[in-house]
Amino acid sequence: LEGPLVRKHEWESTTKKASNRSWDKVYVVLRNGSLLFYKDQKNFKTQPEAYFRGENPVDLVSASAEVAADYTKKKHVFRLKISTGGEYLFQAKDDEEMNQWVRGVQEV
Ligand code: I3P
């Protein structure tokens, strides 16, 4: 599973808010139980080690994803909680795409 999403990092850990909480367009790849972030699809294809802002892949083992029904500022948003306590919001282009990502994370 891969595609463009708009991402907001909300929590660094359970107690620490992320320092940069702005929304960023990212190209997201779910592969081998991890989420990889790229600037765009071309970067993923040509430089698969060149992650968005040099970020490490996010391990999805023990992660959960759910529709972010409480987040009402944007549509088609799901929340990802990872094992470190970190949390992200992701906005998909429509509900169908959002549900594909939620299922993809749940299947890991
Ligand atoms: C953030 C940006 C986000 C906003 C976030 C701001 O500011 O405006 O869109 O989240 O609010 O901190 P900046 O771009 O200057 O870093 P929302 O879109 O969810 O409001 P927050 O601090 O309440 O998370």
Image (spheres, helix red, strand yellow):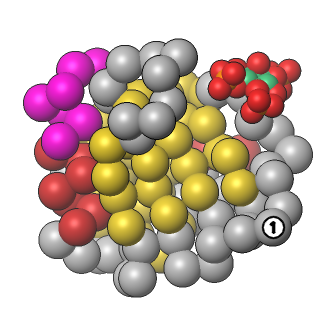
- The amino acid sitting under disc 1 is Thr
Residue 43: percent from left, percent from top? 48, 38
Location of the C terminus (image quadrant) = bottom left
Q: Is residue 39 magenta?
A: no
Q: Residue at x 40, y 82 (%)?
A: 62
Q: Is residue 54 above or below residue 5?
A: below
- 40 or 96, nearer to the observer: 96
Q: Residue at x 25, y 52 (%)?
A: 102
Q: Quadrant of residue 95?
A: top left
Side (left or right) of 1 relative to 75 = left
* Residues in magenta, as a range: 93-99
Q: Quadrant of residue 93?
A: top left
Q: Is residue 97 above or below residue 34?
A: above
Side (left or right) of 101 relative to 15 = left
Residue 104: percent from left, percent from top? 20, 59
- 101 or 46, nearer to the observer: 101
Q: Residue at x 44, y 48 (%)?
A: 79
Q: Quadrant of ligand 1?
A: top right
Asked which secondary structure carries label 1, the reply is loop
- 48 or 103, nearer to the observer: 103
Side (left or right) of 6 relative to 93 = right
Q: Residue at x 63, y 72 (%)?
A: 85
| Count of labels in the image | 1
Q: Is residue 53 above or below residue 106?
A: above
Residue 25: percent from left, percent from top? 53, 26
Q: Residues within 10 Å of mark 1 (few under 14, many from 20)?
A: few
**Cβ of disc 1 within 8 Å of ligand 1?**
no
| Residue 96 makes an appearance in the image | yes
| Residue 50 makes an appearance in the image | no
Q: Which residue is mark 1?
A: 15
Predominant secondary structure, magenta span:
helix
Residue 97: percent from left, percent from top? 18, 32
